[in-house]
Image (cartoon, rainbow, N blue to C red):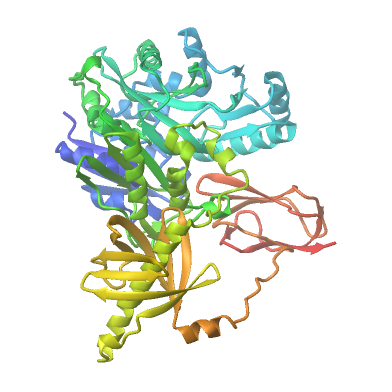
Amino acid sequence: MIKKILIANRGEIACRVIKSAQQMGIKTVAVYSDADKNALHVSMADEAVHIGASPASESYLIIDKIIDACKQTNADAVHPGYGFLSENAQFASALADNDIAFIGPNIKAIKVMGDKIASKLFAEKAGVNIVPGNTDLIESPEQAVKTANQVGYPVMIKASAGGGGKGMRVAYNDAEAAQGYTLAKSEAMSSFGDDRIFIEKFIEDPRHIEIQILADKHGTCLYLVERECSIQRRNQKVVEEAPSSFLTPETRKKMGEQSVALAKAVDYESAGTVEFIVDKEQNFYFLEMNTRLQVEHPVTELITGIDLVEQMIKIAAGEKLNLQQSDIKINGWAIESRIYAEDPFRNFLPSTGRLTKYFPPAEQIKNGLTIRNDTGVYHGGEIAIYYDPMIAKLCTHAPTRAEAISHMADALDQFIIKGISHNIPFVAALMQHPDWQSGDISTSFIAKTYPDGFERAEIPADIKAEICAIAVYLDHKQNIKKAAISTQNSHQVSQHRVIKIDNEYINLTLDSSGKKTTVTHGNNSYILNSNWDLGAPLWSGQINGSHKHFKIDAILNGFEIEHKAYKAVVKIFSKREAELDKKMPIKIASDTSNLLLCPMPGMLNSIDVKVGDIVEIGQALCVVEAMKMENVLTAEKTATVKAVNFSAGESLKVDDVIVEFEID
């Protein structure tokens, strides 16, 4: 049996592997870069080894450093997690040469299935439907344009190695094909150390459905039902679920059996995933095979009760699977929301910095409902620019899909993150969308639902009324505390409030006795019952008998209050204060139209203009890299470059002025 596992990864997946290993009584070793010195996975492991500088190319991607760490700690096995070296055949071979077990498939499977071009050819020979395209390697932007025209627009430009949405671009014309090739190639090299690119037909509005497989070294191979991953943004999955609300049992069986046949053809062992795109008629096409543990594996674990990491470890140790296909059942419904360090209100640009508050909902199983949170961060920790922006994977499990969605919405309401931007408001909005709730989705769902970017919707009247009631409740609690400090009689605290919300002034009255507080607005009354402690960032309690959660931030004369996907700034005044507030002038924002501001923290990869250049609308000005993604900043109007304030290779902060213009 394996005695000590080194996890050649970081973040939430390293923590996830450590948990299963510890439950099995197996010692663990973490590796870490400079940026991860104080990371959660380092503190969770039994031992930790420093392996280099912060960029992955100088630490997590260096095979020799991982091997050396194994030797230092006498680790007899390595779990690669996902990303980094997880699908690197050279890494698996190096481990074998040093008598270290690789907790993953054999080298043949990694070479064939870990390469998107080779796997497509292999699948085609095995009789699996594949997406039309050209599997020749693309060597230049000119060749990309030529091939794209041969295949027919739209096309998908893809890195042969890796996954996770990195090194992928959709092109609808020649200009996009040329630029997409350059960006995909650069991202692939940065993320995977392999910049091979190919092009295939982009099938519009499909569903992305994948089959989880599990195979041992003794010939047994099973499929563990499917996951639907159609809610994607820029080819990066955002929300996943298991099972799919779309597949019939017949299609599920066909996809599962094809996945098993493909795995057996390559002598697969360990956990793996066969990904398909599925059209509206349930025709499915092989997309790729991931020879590793998937990010979204928790939803499969929740509906099957099978610990995939535990099974991977046992398989690597040579044990037989103690399961048959007939043992695999679907128990309820599971949903995973990926919580990212990104700003959904600024085109999902990455966000970095310190987590001044990080309070996820409590993990629990209660009344048939489950909350699970796989994470690699902690309150007070740092989100660095060098790695993937994932903060956590929040999962819920319930008897039905509708209950799992409702439970997810409730869990998101309890998830508090401060100090950086994050996508919780966006995911919360998805949970409320009727098409998502009905299962009417495709991979273009986000792009079509938010074509002009994501913005908060107008607050519905019923939720606005509840937010106002909460604000009055919070203000009253504060005033009671102030009265106690000043020895003022609490009965002298005013029961009347003027609420300012969305530039509207609303008169409310309050009656408080014990835990219950009644707030009245006209003919409507709201009875609040809560154990909220003064200063707590989350209000949980009942409003008119219905249990709800509201996130709270105190501001001058009021509060910022969030609930579901909505956020309101609420000011609370006396009658006289409200009269004076109405007379206050409105602050006018400064004009920055003649400046190119950095929209995110990152590294300036290239600057494509110089002083005196005349730029046109849409012209590329520079490329900023953050969290393994390259972002092209373009001109919004015709102008002359007045000043260039940074050079390639320099670090940037949010709102740094990269270029100044003279507007004609």
Q: Which is more toward the observer, 17 or 51? A: 17
Q: Is residue 115 above or below residue 371?
A: above
- Is residue 84 in view? no
The C terminus, quarter of image: bottom right
Q: Splitting the image into 4 quarters, where does residue 586 fall? A: bottom right
Q: Residue at x 59, y 24 (%)?
A: 203
Q: Which is more toward the observer, 365 or 423? A: 365
Q: Residue at x 69, y 35 (%)?
A: 176
Q: Which is more toward the observer, 113 or 594? A: 594
Q: Residue at x 35, y 28 (%)?
A: 243
Q: Splitting the image into 4 quarters, where does residue 639 fall? A: bottom right
Task: Tell me residue 470's x, y (percent).
Answer: 36, 67
Q: Residue at x 16, y 36 (%)?
A: 24
Task: Tell me residue 44's x, y (percent).
Answer: 24, 50
Q: Is residue 380 above or below residue 186?
A: below
Task: Tell me residue 506's x, y (percent).
Answer: 48, 72
Q: Is residue 586 above or below residue 33?
A: below
Q: Splitting the image into 4 quarters, where does residue 393 fall? A: top left
573 displayed left or right of 398: right
